[in-house]
Image (cartoon, rainbow, N blue to C red):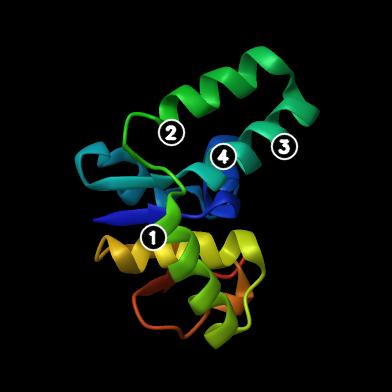
Amino acid sequence: MNVVDSSAWLAYLAGEANAAFFAPAIEDTGALVVPTVCLSEVFKVVLRERGEHEALLATAAMQEGLVAPLDARLALEAAAVGHEEGLALADAIIYATARLHGAVLWTQDEHFAGKPGVRFRAKR
């Protein structure tokens, strides 16, 4: 299973230098878990940069995977993970989602580098 964080989704959607690194995780929709917070973050950025139509297309593609809603169990796990790892709320939700699903987290966010279960590629 794979969780792709918002920065990695945005790199992939924009065809940035790291897009090919994240492509296998994103394109294997049968093994893709999508935190709802990623839907929100990606929609917001794409809406701002390319408009509503493109934002809807981007998030529709994301929903080809299993969407993991923020329920009570995940919220509490994210709070604990955020406390333990010193993560901001959205990052804690994303990391907790990956952990609860036994998934690999794909990211280009530096604060995840070296953490267990993370595939990190520095943003270029």
The answer to whether the residues at label 3 and label 1 have Cβ atoms under 8 Å apart is no
Residue 15 is tagged as: 4
Q: Which numbered disc flags the more N-terminal residue, 3 or 2?
A: 3
What is the C-alpha distance between the residues marked 3 and 1?
28 Å
Residue, disc 3? 45
- Judge left or right: residue 106 versus residue 89: left
Can you say which quadrant of the picture contains the C terminus?
bottom right
Label count reads 4
- Judge left or right: residue 53 versus residue 50: left
The nearer-to-camera label among 1 and 2 is 1
Q: Could you say whether the residue bearing mark 4 is in a helix, strand or loop?
A: loop
Determine the residue located farthest toward the top in the rendered image.
53
- Amino acid residing under circle 4: Gly
Q: Could you say whether the residue bearing mark 2 is in a helix, strand or loop?
A: helix
Residue 62 is tagged as: 2
- Amino acid residing under circle 3: Val
Tell me: residue 67, above or below residue 112: above
Q: Residue at x 40, y 44 (%)?
A: 34
**Closer-to-camera residue (52/100):** 100
Q: Which numbered disc flags the more N-terminal residue, 3 or 1?
A: 3
What is the C-alpha distance between the residues marked 4 and 3?
15 Å
**Closer-to-camera residue (28/47):** 47
The nearer-to-camera label among 4 and 3 is 3
Q: Which numbered disc flags the more N-terminal residue, 2 or 4?
A: 4
- Amino acid residing under circle 1: Arg
Q: Residue at x 22, y 47 (%)?
A: 31
Tell me: residue 55, above or below residue 83: above
Q: Which numbered disc flags the more N-terminal residue, 1 or 2?
A: 2
The nearer-to-camera label among 1 and 4 is 1
Q: Residue at x 72, y 37 (%)?
A: 45
What is the C-alpha distance between the residues marked 1 and 2?
23 Å
